[in-house]
Amino acid sequence: GIGGFVEQTLEFDVAVSGSQCALFSMSGVKALVHRACEGYTSTVFAYGQTGAGKTHSLLGPQDAMAQLADDAVSLVDSAEPLSEACLELIEGARRAKVSGQGLLPRAAQFLFRVLESLCPRGGGLPVVRASFVEVYNEKVFDLLNPNSAVLDVRQRANADTGFHVPGRIDIDCRSAAEVVKVAKQGVAVRHTSSHSLSR
């Protein structure tokens, strides 16, 4: 190596340049969602230095999480119908927000579409539980319970069930909108506390 540094070769499967939609299509997250619906543990783990784009890739811009792809535009309290041009403008703004969504809101929406296709009509959907933990300076924090102590990661006795974080909060979600709401709650804590000198 040069100057005492050891030369290393790093490999990666793909570099995605383009839209959030392209990232979602090429990342393998859809396959992970299908596997999770089959009962397997699935994880998307974002790793990298500060400012590398982890949050943007996972969530997208903050305003993109305010609108889901399947949301209908509601025109409440409209005394008279809006013009076709105005409706097109509203729909264009909705599409622009949705197109910026990252992996998490897209995966949540895809998950509920898959669950709906697997469940018989009239039958209830399985309960989806959402948690939001952050690894920061090699410590694990529950962003849904910002007052909790540092958490541990444990290997379960049964290797098939994998790792878990005892003491973290899980929130039952019955729609993609509820999953995104949990994510927004965690992000709000992350942005304020992850840069705190107390951590």
Image (cartoon, helix red, strand yellow):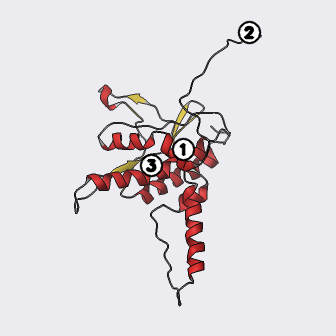
Q: Is residue 7 left or right of residue 112?
A: right
In terms of sequence position, does the residue under pointer 2 or pointer 1 come before the other? 2
Looking at the rendered structure, the secondary structure element under dot 3 is: helix
Q: Kindly give the residue lying farthest to the front in the view shown.
A: 84
Quarter residue 92 falls in: bottom right
Look at the numbered disc 2 and give the secondary structure of its residue: loop
Q: Above or below — where is 41 with respect to 90?
A: above
Which amino acid, mark 1?
Leu
Q: Is residue 148 above or below residue 177?
A: above
Viewer-proximal residue among 184 and 73: 73
User: Label 2 to label 1, Cα distance in Å?
Assistant: 37 Å
Closest to the camera, between mark 1 and mark 3, is 1
Q: Amino acid at mark 3?
A: Ala
Could you say where residue 142 lies in the image, as x and y percent from the top left? 49, 43
Q: CA distance from mark 2 to mark 3?
A: 44 Å
The vertical placement of 21 against 160, above or below, is below
Query: Quarter of the image containing the C terminus?
Result: top right
Q: Which residue is mark 1?
A: 23
**Which numbered marker is on residue 107?**
3
Identify the residue under disc 2.
Answer: 4
Q: Nearer the viewer, residue 114 or 129?
A: 114
Give the residue at x 38% y 58%.
175
Rendered-image quadrant of the N terminus: top right
* 10 Å crowding of disc 1: few (<14), some (14-19), many (20+): some
| Whole-number angstrom distance, CA of label 1 to CA of label 3 | 12 Å
> Do we see residue 143 in this rendering?
no
Give the residue at x 56% y 30%. Answer: 138
Mark 1: secondary structure: helix
Residue 41 marker: none
- Of the pair 146 and 33, the residue shown nearer to us: 33
